Image (cartoon, grey):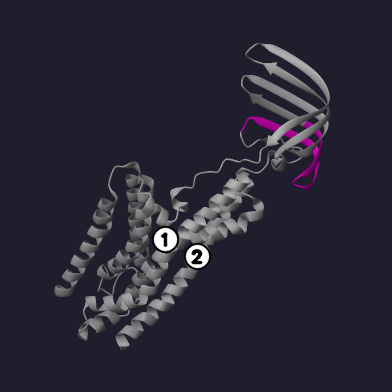
Amino acid sequence: MIFKQSLQRELSRTFGATLVVLVTIVMTMMLIRTLGLASKGLANPQEVLLIMAYSVMGHAPTILALSLFITVVSTMARMIRDSEVVIWLSSGKSITSFIRPLFSFAAPIFITIALMAFMIWPWANGRLQDLRDRYEQRGDLERIVPGEFQESANGMRVIYVDKSEIKNLNDARANNVFIAHSTQGKETITSAQKGHIDIIKGEKYLILDKGHQLVIDNVKQGIKLMEFERMGSLISTSDMEQSIGFPNARTTLTLLKEPKLDNQGELSWRIGIVLASINLMLFALATANTKPRGARSSHLLFAILAFVTYYNFINVGQNWIASGRISFFAVICMLHGVMALSIFAWLARRQYRP
């Protein structure tokens, strides 16, 4: 009882501190990344905190798995350095006696990782995709910044306004409008003194007043210049193409119902992160060195390198399954199964040949 309580108390303190540090690091990295995307016009600046929150929630399974692994490695290293492991081994405990209290402590974490990987991960990725699609599919006039040339969503139109006034999405007015449009071998350049938005049959138009239009036909090698008092230019339609969800945004039930290669690859990642958290915890125990002398920070370097290597193998397996180079069950057996067998063999060797 004393053995179990002392070990779990040490694990709890270390896990809490490690989790706080890792979450802080990930939030900082996500904030820098999101601000960079917003500065390039690839993300809505008003949704930076929301994007960062969804990103951190999506990476929660990886954060928890890494926190648990570092916790076990750090705890065992501290106990070895203070000769506590030697004392427990001398009192009749074996290296495998640590497995039961470790699993007792880590069981809620394993369940949380599984729930986050199978439920929160696709949900957070789906929300991120919705935010990205909604921002990319916003109306062309909503993209305009006065004094800057702005390309349309389809890349076929460039719009410039000198001054603009937007009361709401359907009541925007602009002065000194310039539009360059290229399609089907024709280049159209339109300029007008004023412009405003009007909704006609569910489609959004930019109505231009008092301007000129130059049409250059590159096929027939002709040029036409016209002057107009009022002209309408289609900006966007109400029927927007819905993007197809990426595999990481699909629910686990969808992955099981539609066993396509990319879905199998995504499913292998979700199952793999859960199995990896179990294997890495046992791996930390199996590789715990009973020699108290050694570099104090070497265990942290070892933990990070081991986790990165295992995590990269999971990603490689996912890509190989998606490309059809290897089967789903082969990755599960060859990667996680072989890893588990190797760890148990290592523990058995430590048990009978300390």
Q: Residue furthest left?
A: 352
Q: How far apart in space, not on screen, are marks 1 and 2 (Cα)? A: 20 Å
Q: Circle 1 sits on which residue?
A: 118
Q: Few, some or many C-alpha atoms within 10 Å of disc 2 (few <14, some 14-19, many ≥20)? A: some
Residue 89 in the image: state x and y as whole percent. Answer: 22, 81
Magenta segment range? 155-177
Name the amino acid type tagged 2: Val
- Could you tell me which quadrant the N terminus lies in? bottom left
Q: Position of residue 243 (x, y in %)?
A: 53, 43
Magenta span includes 160: yes
Asked which secondary structure carries label 1, the reply is helix
Q: On the rendered structure, is 298 left or right of 217? A: left
Q: Residue at x 42, y 65 (%)?
A: 115
Q: Amino acid at mark 1?
A: Phe
Which callout, 1 or 2, points to the residue nearer the camera?
1
* The disc label shown at residue 41, or none: none
- The image's mark for residue 23 is 2
Disc 1 or 2, which lies upstream in sequence?
Answer: 2
In the image, is residue 133 above or below residue 333?
above
Query: Which quarter of the figure has residue 238?
Result: top right
Q: Nearer the viewer, residue 127 or 204?
A: 204
Residue 325, image x, y percentages: 29, 42
Let me know if residue 116 is in the magenta part. Answer: no
- State the residue in front, 227 or 296: 227
Between 39 and 133, the one lying in front of the other is 133
- In the rendered image, the quadrant that contains the C terminus is bottom left
Q: Is residue 181 left or right of residue 109?
A: right
Q: Main secondary structure of the magenta part?
A: strand
- Which residue lies at the image location 39% right of the left edge and 69% below the top edge? 111
